[in-house]
Image: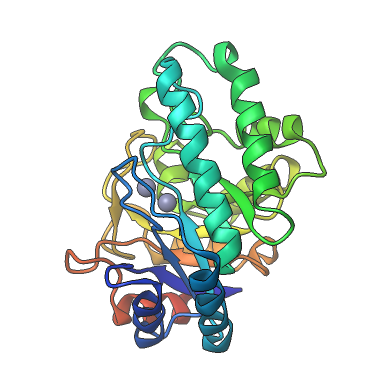
Amino acid sequence: MKIGAHVSASGGLARALQRGTDLGAEVIQVFLSSPRAWAFRNYEPGEAEEFRSVLSSSGLEMVAHASYLINLASPDESIRKKSDDLLCATMASARLLGISAVILHTGSHRGEGLDRYRTQLVNSLTKAASVGGSTTRLLLENTAGSGGTIGARFEELADLIDSVGAGANLGVCLDTQHMFAAGYYFGDPDSVQAVVAELRSTVGAPVAVHLNDSKVPLGKGTDRHENIDEGEIGSKALGMLLTDQLFEESSVILEVPGAGDGPRKEDVLQAFSLLR
Ligand SMILES: [Zn+2]
Ligand SMILES: [Zn+2]
């Protein structure tokens, strides 16, 4: 297991790496472009190659979170097309930069039901996964469940991954706040066993984990992260779940608010003491 945090990439990716090192992280997550804009700055091959060597000598793993605007299942065709393009651009840059995975919120059918846009969604995921090649994996993140979002249930993610096919470089990022908000309880040993069994029989071992406590109660359906032990889940439940063998190879990334500016060194230390 690697443990780390989401960090700002302002000032460039080398600065992000430095922030990760300062936090004591083993893995960091960044946005490659503004998560709330369609514009994407492509990296030149020379620039990317230079960064790749900086990344590899840092000893850190870097993953990227795709833009929040991406919605591969939007009822609006122009949004689907822009989403497709932005995801592929993100995958291509991530691959050039030596980034191991791109984490995606699969999208929302806005209440129209998944079936209607399922084929396009599977095609888009297939294409994006192939752009990442064998080195940059596309990870589908479970959602909190509100607003017709896709992937609140593990079996829904498993079904999409199976539809893309076993040869594709796809996996799952499990967000602990989202799963709790979607109604998965893991507050005692029996329920941890049940949730782990359900993961094993659907998506398997998560490649990445977003480690977050929850501002909202179990099953509330909304995406609201909280610092570990300051929310409704608590460190005991998070520790019980994530020390299961299933997560042995996972990259665990804090996305907590900290003091308002994202994960702090003390948050990373807390995660280490909880999980190691
Ligand atoms: Zn997340
Ligand atoms: Zn979230």
Is residue 251 at all visible to an observer of this figure?
yes
Quarter containing the C terminus: bottom right
Q: Position of residue 193 (x, y in %)?
A: 65, 52
Is residue 106 at all visible to an observer of this figure?
no
Identify the residue at image location x=48%, y=72%: 47
Q: Nearer the viewer, residue 259 or 179?
A: 259
Identify the residue at image location x=74%, y=29%: 163
User: In the rendered view, does 128 fall on the left or right side of 169?
Assistant: left
Q: Nearer the viewer, residue 157 or 246?
A: 157
Q: Nearer the viewer, residue 226 or 252?
A: 252
Identify the residue at image location x=61%, y=73%: 1
Q: Quadrant of residue 100?
A: bottom right
For residue 60, above or below residue 262: below
Question: In the rendered view, how is the structure colored?
Answer: rainbow
- The residue sitting at the left extreme is 260
Q: Nearer the viewer, residue 80 or 240?
A: 80
Q: Position of residue 135 (x, y in %)?
A: 69, 62
